[in-house]
Every structure is written in C-alpha cells, then in structure tokens.
Amino acid sequence: MKPVLQKSFDKQLFLDNVKRHLTSTYATTQEHATKRSWYLAMSRALSELTTLDLLETEQDEHILQAKSVNYLSLEFLIGRLTGNNLLNMGIIEMIREAMSELGQDLSDLLEEERDPSLGNGGLGRLAACFMDSLAAQEFPAVGYGLHYEYGLFKQSFSEGHQQEAPDAWCGVEGYPWEVARPELAQEIGFYGHVKTEQVNGREVRRWIPGMTVKGMPWDIPVVGYKSNTVYPLRLWECQAIAPFSLESFNNGNYFEAQHALIDAGNITKVLYPNDNHEKGKTLRLMQQYFHSAASIRDIIRRHELAGHAIEDLPKFETIQLNDTHPAIAIPELMRILLDEKGMNWSEAWKISSQTFAYTNHTLLPEALETWDEALILRLLPRHMEIIYDINHRFLQEVRTQWPGDVTKQQKLSIIQEGFHRMVRMANLCVVGSYAVNGVAAMHSELVKRDLFPEFHELYPDRLLNVTNGITPRRWLQYCNPDLSDLITSKIGDSWPVALDELSALKALADDSDFQHEFMAVKKANKVRLAEWVKEHLDIELNTDAIFDVQIKRLHEYKRQHLNLLHILSLYYRLTENPQFEMAPRVFIFAAKAAPGYYLAKEIIYAINMIAEKINHDPKVNEKLKIVFIPDYRVSMAEIIIPATDVSEQISTAGKEASGTGNMKMALNGALTIGTMDGANVEIREEVGDENIYIFGLEVDDVEKLKASGYNPYDYYNADPLLKASLDLLLGDTFTPGHPGKLRTIYESLLDGGDPYLVLADFASYVEAQSKVDQQYRDQTGWAKKAILNTALVGKFSSDRSIRDYVDNIWKLKQVKR
Ligand SMILES: *Cc1c(COP(=O)(O)O)cnc(C)c1O
C-alpha cells in the first residue's frame, strides 16, 4: 500500500482548482459563494484527481492483461461520496485544513451533498460495498448500473401518511463526482423483427430493431483505500438518438419524432421503487435490456481493445449478475456471439456459460422475476428465440437425467406453461451460469433444499454460498470516528483492511476503563442522534434510554408490526400497572414503503399515530418514546447506526436472505434481538449465544406450523397481553375521534391469516425484550456484550465476501498499483 496521493498532494494547486471551479464551473465569486457552491467546487476539484487515476487504472497494462469482474446491478445505493472518498484517498485532514484557509468548514460542506439513492435497500447497498472492497483489495473490476434521472423517492409524512416526492439527485448543476464518457456510448435496439441472411453459405439470424436509443455512460470513481487504484462505476443513461429521424423531421412528422424522443428519454428516468417485489412492467424490462446490452457491449469492447480473442472471454472477464434483474444479458451475449461473431451454438454456449455467475437474493415467490413470453417476443424477438433454444437443449439434458419424468421437466423449464406463458428468469440464470450463490449460509441451504433442489441434483457443484458483508471503511471508520479512534488506540490502524483484527478487543471486554471509554463513545453518538432528532423533528430524547432501532425497508416479512405490537404491550402494561418496571426506551424507526404497497403504508401510518400519542402522554413518556425518522437513506443510516443499542432483526425465519443492517449495527456495538434468519444465524455463531437475543420460531417450526393449519386466533385468545395489545388498534386511542383507522393491520393479523406469523412469535419476542431490559440495567454486563459484538463480527467485512467470490467463483488476481 503506497499512499502516493497523500505524499503528492499539492495544497496550493488544489486550492487554485477549487477557486477555478467556483468561478468558471459554478459562476460565482468567493464573496458570494454559498456553502453548496463551495461543496460543488471542492468536489469537482477532488474528482479531477480521481478521474486521472481512473484513466490510468483503465490503461494499466497489468490490468488489461488480468481477469476482471463485471458487477452487473440495476441498483447501486452508493450514498454520499465526498467524505468517504477523502477517507479512502487518505487526505481528509489535509482537505479540512485547506478548506479552512478558504474560510470553509469541511463538515458543513459534506452536509451539502445529496445522497445518490440509486437503489432501494440491501441489494443496492451490497453492490456499493462490493465495489468499495474490490477497489480496496485491488481486484480488477467494473461496476455497471443505470444512471436514473430520479433515484428512490424522497419520503415525508403528512398527518402520519407517507408522501413521496421525486429525487433529482444530480441537482441542476450536475453531480460533481461523475464524468461523462461520450466516446464509449452505445446504441441499443428494441422491437422490430428477425430475418435470416446467408453469410459465407451459412444461415445467420439477424435482428432488425424497430427503435434505437443511445446509451451514454457516466463514470463514478470507486476509490481504492490508500492506493492509486480507481475503478469505474459505469452508469448508463438513455438518450434519444437525435435527430431521431431526419426524414420525419422534414416530412411533417415532427410531433411524432418528438414523441419518440420523449419515449427514449424515459427508459432511465426513474428507479422502480419496489424492494423484493417485481411486477412485469414493459418499461422495467426495457431498463433491464438497456442496462444489459450496453454493459455487454462495453465488456466486449474492453476485451477486444486489450487485444484478446473473443474465444478467450471467460479467461479475462467474468460477469456477476446481482439477482435476475440483468438476466437478459445471457441471451444478449449469445446473440452477439451467434449472430455478430458468427459462432455456432456450442462455441457460443461454451463461452457464455463460462462467463456468467448469478447471485440469488430471495426465496419470496412475489420477488422471483417472470416475464410474459409475449412481451419479450415483441420487445426482443431474437432474444426470445435464443431463450427457446437454450431451453430446448436444457430440457434434453433433463430428459437424459430423468427419462420420462414430465413433472421434472415442467418444474425446471425456463418457460412456465399456462394461459400466459412466462419466462422464469431465475431458471435462465441457473442454466446459463457457471456458479450460483445465495447470500448467507442458511439462505444458500434453502436455495438448495427448497428453491432449486432438482438443479442441485443436476449440477451438484453449481450452487454455492457467499455470505454478504459491509465495508468497514464507511460503516465504522467513516460513520463512527470516535469508536474508530478508540479502537486504533488499542489495536493499531490496520483493522479497516483486516477486520478480523478486531478480535483483539476481546481481551478488553472485561477491562473497566475500556468499557467506560466504549460506552462514552456510544453515549456521544446517541447525543449526536438526539440533537439531529431535536433539530429536525422537535422531539426530545433521553440519551440514557435504550436506543432500540429498526431501520430497513418496510415489509411485512421484516415485521415492523411485531415491533409495534411489543411497543403497544409496554404501553398497555405501563398504563394498567403503575408498578411495571422498565428501563426507559427510545424506539427508532426509519423505513420507506413501496408507493403501491398498501399494508406497508398502513404500518407506517400506525407507527406515526402511536408515536404521536405516546410521545405526548405524560403517564408514559418518561419511559417510552417513538421516533419515525423520515427519508431513510445511507447518510441517515450513518448517523443512526453508531447510536444504536438494540438492533431489531426480527423477520419471519426463512424470509430474510441475509440482511446487512444487522452487520452494520453489531459492528458498531449494538446487541441484536433477532430470529434465526439470514446472517443473524452467523452473527450468533460469531458473537456467541450469550451476546445476542435470539427468539421465535425457526425455519422448520414455521413450515410445520403452516402445514398444520396456522390460526392466529389461537394465539390471540390464549394470550391476554397479546389480545390487549392488538385490541388497542381497534378504538380511537391513537386516532382520537376516528375509531378504527388502524383496523387494517389488526385485520391482516387475524382474519387475514397473519402470513408472517407475527402472533405466533409475539410471546417469545416479548420475553426476549424483557431480557434485553434486564441486561441494560446492568451497564457493566451490557458494555461487555457490546464490546464483544464489535470485536467478533470481523467476518462480516465485505472484503471477506469479495475474497470468497474471488477464491470460489471468479478466480481473479490482485493487481497492485
Ligand atoms: C444497509 C442498508 C439497507 C439494508 O438493511 P437491512 O436491514 O439489511 O434490510 C437498506 N437501506 C440502507 C440505506 C442501508 O444502508
């Protein structure tokens, strides 16, 4: 590791560049510049440095001759870049000092950056952490995504209800960290027909698209940790090819031509706001194909530019599909190899099937993508032909393995038969990839056991596990500087690139001085969050209270309503029983609901109304406070996570594939209360059963209960506390004068059948929560557990995840620069 940037940093040159951008890029003077202009000018000056390194990395002969991973994802939830890039570049203090010479406070300027929210939640954030870890460890990589004009909607509340507003993250001035690469633009077709041509006496299929758009790449630098390595995150923006048709401009069809321009511009207008839920909209499939086609062409361009033969593609490039969203890249590569490179099927398939690998992120049926065959046929006629061909050959393999077994064929077929024939994208990915991985040990086992058992039989080496991770640079070093300094003072400063070294803190878990220092940092972070809440929401928080945090997308399977029922049970007990003892608690929520997800929005409304009542009720508000922080995003997570005492990870067992919020909070010294689900299982393995609060049904229990005919009324009628808590939703306690406004949740949990077994887990959850309460009253014991959480979760660094991918799937070599 050579921190060349640090040594070669020229302060005067940097200051001159900032001033130059202030005037020539942002048209203002030092006297009149706003904080925003200063932030923009500073970031532009910094991005010039990273752009140079990006171009040098791109042209580095060692990288051109090495194998690269291409990470294809429709989402990259990168969060703010300026502060994090400064940290990775190793120049944060130098820039702080330089900007102060201009009369500017760096921390203030960093607050001016709007989060690029180009993702929904965990899946998009994982892609961002993986890019950080690839660059930090110098494994050659390119991230390919979409340059949405509007990222995930901005959330606010109006009388407790979620309001959505568009998020034009680039701002009118443009985003300072990105650089356009017009020389790398691609043309992408849609619709049209397929014809057969004779080429050298061979029949070749050729697709004649009916509409063509331009893919314009924007590069965002992914900065290596204290190295000069910068890899691109390449985001494609869809633009109309202008003039769309000169002829139509001239022959009077001007308005039609304009219409086509507007359509083309729409493809990357907006990120679909669904998390773990897919509904087959044409524009979404257009986004997927646009993303895949532009990326595949760019990969082949780079491969050929480096002087490699197309037959050697799998030797130099591997393509990781982040979920099935980019699955159409498989028939697209096949199309290029067959129709444009003139290969025969077996040559083309050999290359393609050795190039792709696929990550499965969910078992939820509503999240597994299927596309209407008729839609693909219309939008991408040649790709549908290729999918038929892939399926035809694959089903022959199935028939060889299981002669005469029609059920197996129906189950494994890429095409789902029925009135509307559908294409199963997950099946296409498993057939077309050399490796398929789940995202946590338990999830990967369920992929083998429940989702793809026949595939596992057919291809016993294909299904693997790579447990997710988080980058310790952003999620500890950057967001929790006080804890980072404390850790560094005890164990040195290499833990950010070797997170297992945190285990050395284990020896200090009983050290009373260290316990006090550790808890003082936690307290300071709670004060920082409380100040944010006071300033933005005007709610006063007791920073001695337990900060109990559930921050994640709003989803029934994540069970925010189980958390809410526990709060209602505390409220009930506090109001009914003056003797009831509990440590004061602040419940913190943050969550966006998909705009079309009715019940999720009702849960947000209920939390807000219950918060409103409880926070103003003097009978309980010394003990209970509820805060729903609006507009959950990466920069908000960076403030909440370091202040967390209790991390809520309470999904129905078997439903959360991994979770990564669980890792972020444990790393920052929070104790988890959680089910045996996703990576919670592995967190428990690492920290030990006495340092985590596990409750509830396990996967097998869930299955048995459902099979035996689960009736939520059995629990409701048998448990007076549960009944009392639920019944609070019926009257007008929380919606004065409007009884029944919280009924929807009540009904979904009773007559609605409670599909996520909230009632079945209630008693066990309440019991675990009372243990948390008991433990918090013993601060020494709590400090020890908190320290052990930080000390023992080194496994969950995304550096380790990337090494697992490299060793078991991608087979890359580091290229140190
Ligand atoms: C980490 C993160 C997530 C994922 O949280 P889970 O609890 O794993 O669902 C979602 N959104 C943001 C902004 C995050 O930082």
Image (spheres, grey):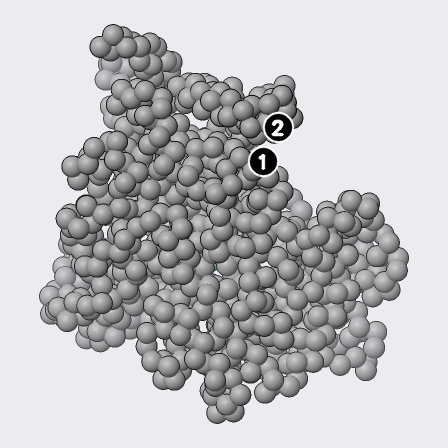
The residue located at (31%, 10%) in the rendering is 203
Q: Nearer the viewer, residue 752 or 297?
A: 297
Position of the N terminus by quadrant: bottom left
> 567 or 759: nearer the eye?
759
| Label of residue 454 in the image | 1
Q: Which residue is mark 2?
A: 408
Q: Is residue 237 visible to us here?
A: no
Asked if the residue at label 2 sits under 8 Å from ligand 1, the reply is: no
Residue 350 is labelled as none
Side of 489 where 715 appears, left or right: right
Residue 32, horizontal then vertical, whole percent: 22, 64
Q: Residue 746 location in percent, x, y? A: 77, 52
Instruction: Give coordinates of residue 129: x percent, y percent.
Output: 39, 57
Label 2 crowd bin: few (<14), some (14–19), many (20+), radius 10 Å: some
Quarter of the image that includes the C terminus: bottom left
Furthest residue in direction right, as rendered: 717
Amino acid type of the residue tagged 2 in the rendering: Lys
User: Disc 1, disc 2: CB below 8 Å?
Assistant: yes
x, y percent for residue 275 = 54, 46
Q: Earlier in the sequence, mark 1 or mark 2?
A: 2
